[in-house]
Image (cartoon, coloured by chain):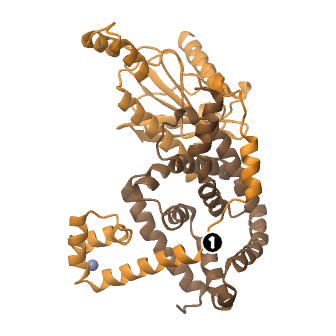
């Protein structure tokens, strides 16, 4: 394959999914800069391995690489987890303003609190549940697609989604002080 | 459908992933079961909350632009060459077959005397399984059951846990210290996994007995991981890592060399 054709094919098949890649990385890392690092690394890898891509689902293919890149990074950065926690605290105040920017001004007052609680609950969710929730609810991927990205059976996708939602409901109940 | 079965399938019903007949069966139970109805309402509620009220983080336009500019320009061709003697390479078979150079029976002989007796799909499935195992181990942070930088601790640890004795090669002097070992269950059998590390990159080396002839080191990639494998002295070896392919090949050569020299001494 000619190199400029490769780049064109790559741009057509993989570039359009950059928001999906970033959203997943952002939910996995919790940090904007970290998510950009992961996505950048994932894209370089994706380009390098693009000869192995034969026109399957470009989003699934890319998200699989993003996720693998994340877990390698996660593994390497665990030693600094305390530092990361500190960073997360800093980020969470930014996150709130992110939400405010996006929301409809009249509804901010009502939504602000419940959205903040929900966002917080998602962050507290163990990572194996959080990733399937992001893929299902935010990316609207099918069980089959999720199974392919994570390389687990579809039955496991199903049970993780079920348990993830239950846990999220439990975290929300606690953080809400029992009020629903 | 009884209550236990319904509870298991409930998330798939919420996500509209059940087949029509399953969904009908499920609904029949749902209509008569309070607990499943509560569970269903909770799942639907949480699902809608996340869909509608959590943030979808988009990449900034500046970042996207930078990313596109950073893509390698024109020199990536050489990095991805296929190994010339990969027998499961379908193009290779097709080229011969369609040219009428060899008949089906000859082809069968080529296959059976090839370095790997596995069919392409079995080979593929094995690769898949090994990569999942590698990823799973990273995920749950469970690379090793026995953690030691000493081959004399790792080797005896396998005793009694396997029906073979995997060679545990010391490679710290060449930059690949041992980190530990574990046992995995892949392709229907127990397999020894020895965990090495190069800088911060873990390498999982999978070893299990083979009846195939010795083979050269083969390279492949899957889901962004580099993989090398070979057969030698009656064992299959597969190494998986996010290390670059050159470094991983160097690792494979070192292991192979040491195994051979141990065998002779
Ligand atoms: Zn029931």
Coordinates of residue B113 in the picture (x, y in percent): 35, 12
- Ligand 1: quadrant of the figure: bottom left
Q: Quadrant of residue A177?
A: bottom right
Q: Residue at x 59, y 72 (%)?
A: A122
Residue A109 drawn at (x, y percent)? 68, 91
Query: Where A109 falls versus A80 (above or below)?
Result: below
- Residue B108 falls left or right of residue B258: left
Q: Secondary structure at mark 1?
A: loop
In the visual, does A140 lie left or right of A87? left
- Chain B is which colour? orange
Q: Is residue B104 above or below residue A167?
A: above
x, y percentage for residue B178?
64, 34
- Depth check, front residue: B104 or A104: A104
Q: Is residue B80 visible?
A: yes
Observer-nearest of B149 and B100: B100
Label 1: few (<14), some or many (≥20) within 10 Å? some
Mark 1 CB in 8 Å range of ligand 1? Answer: no
The answer to whether any part of residue A80 appears in the image is no
Please tell me in which quadrant of the rendered image residue B205 appears: top right
- Residue appearing at x 57%, y 62% in the figure: A127
| Picture colour for chain A | brown
Q: Nearer the viewer, residue B153 or B18?
A: B18
């Amino acid at each position: 394959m000619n190199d400029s054709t490769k780049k064109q094919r790559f741009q057509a098949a993989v570039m359009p999914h950059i928001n999906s890649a970033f959203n997943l990385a952002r939910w996995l890392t919790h940090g904007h800069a970290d998510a950009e690092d992961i996505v950048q690394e994932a894209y370089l890898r994706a380009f390098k391995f693009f000869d192995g891509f034969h026109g399957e689902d470009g989003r699934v293919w890319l998200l699989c690489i993003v996720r693998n890149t994340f877990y390698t990074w996660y593994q390497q950065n665990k030693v600094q987890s305390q530092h990361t926690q500190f960073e997360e605290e800093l980020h969470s105040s930014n996150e709130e303003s992110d939400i405010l920017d996006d929301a409809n001004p009249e509804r901010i007052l009502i939504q602000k609190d419940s959205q903040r609680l929900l966002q917080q609950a998602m962050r507290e969710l163990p990572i194996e549940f959080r990733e399937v929730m992001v893929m299902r609810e935010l990316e609207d991927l099918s069980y089959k697609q999720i199974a392919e990205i994570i390389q687990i059976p579809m039955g496991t996708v199903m049970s993780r989604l079920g348990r993830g939602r239950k846990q999220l409901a439990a975290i929300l109940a606690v953080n809400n002080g029992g009020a629903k | 459908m009884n209550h236990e079965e319904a509870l298991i399938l409930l998330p798939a019903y919420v996500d509209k992933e059940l087949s029509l007949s399953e969904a009908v069966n499920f609904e029949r139970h749902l209509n008569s079961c309070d607990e499943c109805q509560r569970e269903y309402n909770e799942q639907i509620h949480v699902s809608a909350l996340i869909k509608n009220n959590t943030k979808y983080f988009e990449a900034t336009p500046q970042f996207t632009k930078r990313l596109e500019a950073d893509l390698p320009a024109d020199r990536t061709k050489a990095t991805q060459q296929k190994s010339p003697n990969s027998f499961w390479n379908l193009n290779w078979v097709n080229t011969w077959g369609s040219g009428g150079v060899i008949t089906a029976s000859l082809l069968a002989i080529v296959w059976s005397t090839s370095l790997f007796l596995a069919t392409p799909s079995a080979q593929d499935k094995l690769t898949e399984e090994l990569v999942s195992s590698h990823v799973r181990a990273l995920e749950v942070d469970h690379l090793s059951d026995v953690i030691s930088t000493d081959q004399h601790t790792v080797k005896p640890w396998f005793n009694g846990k396997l029906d073979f004795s995997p060679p545990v090669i010391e490679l710290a002097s060449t930059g690949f210290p041992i980190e530990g070992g574990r046992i995995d269950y892949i392709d229907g059998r127990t397999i020894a996994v020895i965990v090495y590390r190069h800088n911060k990159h873990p390498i999982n080396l999978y070893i299990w007995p083979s009846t195939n002839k010795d083979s050269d080191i083969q390279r492949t990639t899957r889901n962004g991981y580099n993989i090398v494998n070979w057969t030698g002295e009656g064992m299959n070896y597969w190494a998986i890592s996010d290390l670059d392919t050159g470094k991983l090949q160097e690792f494979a050569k070192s292991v192979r060399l040491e195994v051979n020299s141990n065998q002779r001494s």
